[in-house]
Image (cartoon, rainbow, N blue to C red):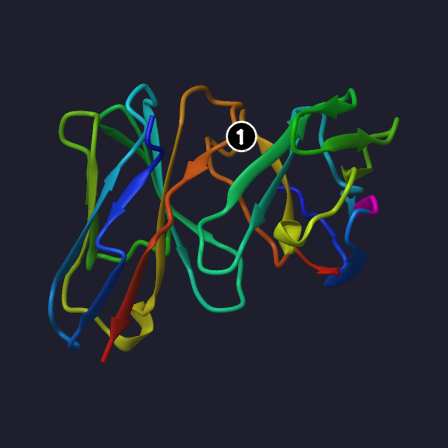
Amino acid sequence: DAKTTQPNSMESNEEEPVHLPCNHSTISGTDYIHWYRQLPSQGPEYVIHGLTSNVNNRMASLAIAEDRKSSTLILHRATLRDAAVYYCILRDVQTSGSRLTFGEGTQLTVNP
Amino acid sequence: DTGVSQDPRHKITKRGQNVTFRCDPISEHNRLYWYRQTLGQGPEFLTYFQNEAQLEKSRLLSDRFSAERPKGSFSTLEIQRTEQGDSAMYLCASSLARVDGYTFGSGTRLTVV
């Protein structure tokens, strides 16, 4: 699986937007960009995924650069419950089967 | 839909003992995955089932590890002759289609003493 690069940690204030960056310069044409988050003592939680176009769902928005070498997960209004480790993962369903390869992610701290 | 269930939530075992974990995926999901996570690290892939067929296994899955999904519904992960290095969170996930996101369970925390 192609590698992603994320900052180790980020901080935000409650009720402010948060932009979590992810670089994936070696992305291939068949790589989907997936985001998961993991709260303490829980399993990872699916957030959003996309291929080329920007995506929105009830949890977040995913902005994908035109060249697809980077993406940004956007939390529109951070809450204390958004404090978690956020993982950006490339998933090539054609060559890597169904596995997800997690990196170390970004630890998001939300200040009240 | 009660999500992905894992049992037990915690297991403490003595080195050398065998342990078995159970995972009940979301009922309509035909794909099931096992991952392992140690403290401070992201989850690592162990194995993947589509229905009852085990289609992919990681090199992390040594001979002491075996996973089954006999009727394409629940799955079990057994670790024989446990070692202290097996101490980790064991996570199960399921999904419906190949490109879909996974739904993870809360995991089984194994401590080998």
Q: Amino acid at mark 1?
A: Thr
- Which residue in the rendered view is the most extreme toward the right? A66
A86 inside magenta stretch: no
Instruction: Please identify the quarter of the rendering in which residue B55 is found.
Output: top left
Q: Is residue A78 left or right of residue B18?
A: right
Residue B21 visible from this viewpoint: yes
Q: Is residue B66 left or right of residue A9?
A: left
Viewer-side residue, A51 vs B2 = B2
Q: Chain of mark 1?
A: A
Viewer-side residue, A45 vs B62 = A45
- Residue shown at the point (32%, 70%) measured from the top left: B87
Circle 1 — which element?
A: loop
Q: Which secondary structure dominates the residues rendered in magenta?
A: strand
Task: In the rendered view, tell whether residue A72 sits above or below residue B31.
Answer: below
Residue A4 % position (x, y): 71, 48
Task: In the rendered view, tell whether residue B112 sits above or below residue A109.
Answer: below
Task: In the rendered view, tell whether residue A76 sits above or below residue B107.
Answer: above
Residue A88 % position (x, y): 66, 44
Residue A34 % position (x, y): 63, 35
- Which residue in the rendered view is the most extreme toward the bottom? B113
Instruction: Please identify the quarter of the rendering in which residue B72 is found.
Output: top left
Q: Is residue A87 left or right of residue A41?
A: right
**What residue does disc 1 label?**
A95
Identify the magenta region.
A16-20
- Residue shown at the point (22%, 80%) measured from the top left: B113
Q: Residues within 10 Å of mark 1 (few under 14, many from 20)?
A: few
